[in-house]
Image (cartoon, helix red, strand yellow):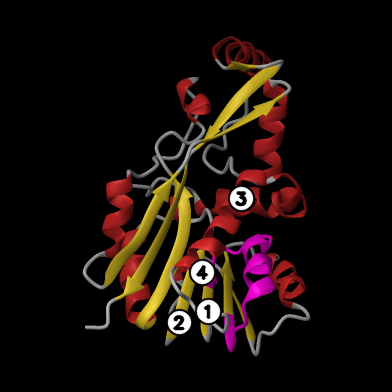
């Protein structure tokens, strides 16, 4: 479904946003906290054993996870190699026996870390070309009873951008996301919510998108007239209070590796 995504463009946009991401990605921070809560609801031990996080980025989820959990080994992956420094800072002083950073595209990472007790990822799935194949590989790398916990976005995500005719990701339905469990995982939980952010002006929306790197879809540059036309149409179509709105549609999933 996402075969048209340019991973090199995604890498460039997120690399540029790394220094500003944690300050501006309010919704993604909320999502990371929800994933940690979901892990605890699934009955996970505070000592997690072998953990693999893919798409760790600025290590927002990493830091939250290890505030309350420990691990024998933590394998962290991101498309942006510079993410390593953020991960190292997040686990410094935490109870993590071994840290290994695995740079590059997780869909090409071979082999994946094995004998995993937990795999997790925040707001990454939508960038994958073949998530079903990755989840098959994760299943083969998980211990029986191990958990895979992740978040992504549903069809209403950033609908304002798509409605105005701009490039948008082909977000998956809840059914498609749940189907990633395949035959190897059982679905423990799948939840969704709609979050509405308000900004002073459309210019602030675009700035927010740039500062969080989530605009890794189109490399086309606007002309001045196209830019002004977008601002005008956004103001007219999506007013909210004294400014404008932007919609987010987080989806949260917890899968458990079947024991037989």
- Residue 47, quarter of the rendered image: bottom right
Is residue 137 visible in the rendered image? The answer is: no
Q: Are marks 2 and 1 in contact (CB under 8 Å)?
A: yes
Q: Is residue 128 above or below residue 140?
A: above
Read off the residue under disc 1.
51
Residue 31, image x, y percentages:
56, 52
Q: Earlier in the sequence, mark 1 or mark 3?
A: 3
Mark 4 neighbour density, 10 Å: few (under 14) some (14–19) many (20 or more): some
Element type at marker 2? strand
Q: CA distance from mark 1 to mark 3?
A: 21 Å
Magenta segment: 53-74
Read off the residue under disc 4.
40
Q: Earlier in the sequence, mark 2 or mark 1?
A: 1
Element type at marker 4? helix
Element type at marker 1? strand
Residue at 59 percent across and 9 percent down: it is 236
Q: Earlier in the sequence, mark 4 or mark 3?
A: 3
- Residue nearest the viewer, comparing 12 with 37: 37
- Residue nearest the viewer, comparing 81 with 252: 252
Q: Earlier in the sequence, mark 2 or mark 3?
A: 3
Q: Nearer the viewer, mark 1 or mark 3?
A: 3
Q: CA distance from mark 4 to mark 1?
A: 15 Å
Q: CA distance from mark 4 to mark 3?
A: 16 Å
Taking the image as shown, residue 49 lies to the left or right of residue 82, namely left
Q: CA distance from mark 2 to mark 1?
A: 6 Å
């Amino acid at each position: 479904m996402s075969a048209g995504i340019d991973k090199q463009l995604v890498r460039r946009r997120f690399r540029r946003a790394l220094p500003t991401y944690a300050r501006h990605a309010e919704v993604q921070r909320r999502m990371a906290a929800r994933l940690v809560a979901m892990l605890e609801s699934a009955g996970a031990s505070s000592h997690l054993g072998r953990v693999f996080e893919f798409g760790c980025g600025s290590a927002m989820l990493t830091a939250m996870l290890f505030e309350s959990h420990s691990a024998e080994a933590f394998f962290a992956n991101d498309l942006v190699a510079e993410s390593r420094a953020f991960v190292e800072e997040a686990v410094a002083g935490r109870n993590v026996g071994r840290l290994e950073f695995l740079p590059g595209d997780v869909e090409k990472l071979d082999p994946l870390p094995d004998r995993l007790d937990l795999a997790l990822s925040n707001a990454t799935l939508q960038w994958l070309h073949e998530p079903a194949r990755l989840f098959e590989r994760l299943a083969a790398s998980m211990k029986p009873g191990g958990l895979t916990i992740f978040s992504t976005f549903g069809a209403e995500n950033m609908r304002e951008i798509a409605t105005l005719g701009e490039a948008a990701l082909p977000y998956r339905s809840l059914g498609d996301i749940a189907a990633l469990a395949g035959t190897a995982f059982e679905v423990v939980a799948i939840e969704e919510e709609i979050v509405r952010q308000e900004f002073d002006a459309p210019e602030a929306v675009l700035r927010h998108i740039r500062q969080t790197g989530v605009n890794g879809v189109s490399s086309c540059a606007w002309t001045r007239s196209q830019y002004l036309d977008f601002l005008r149409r956004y103001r007219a179509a999506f007013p909210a209070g004294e400014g404008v709105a932007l919609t987010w549609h987080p989806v949260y999933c917890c899968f458990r590796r079947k024991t037989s």
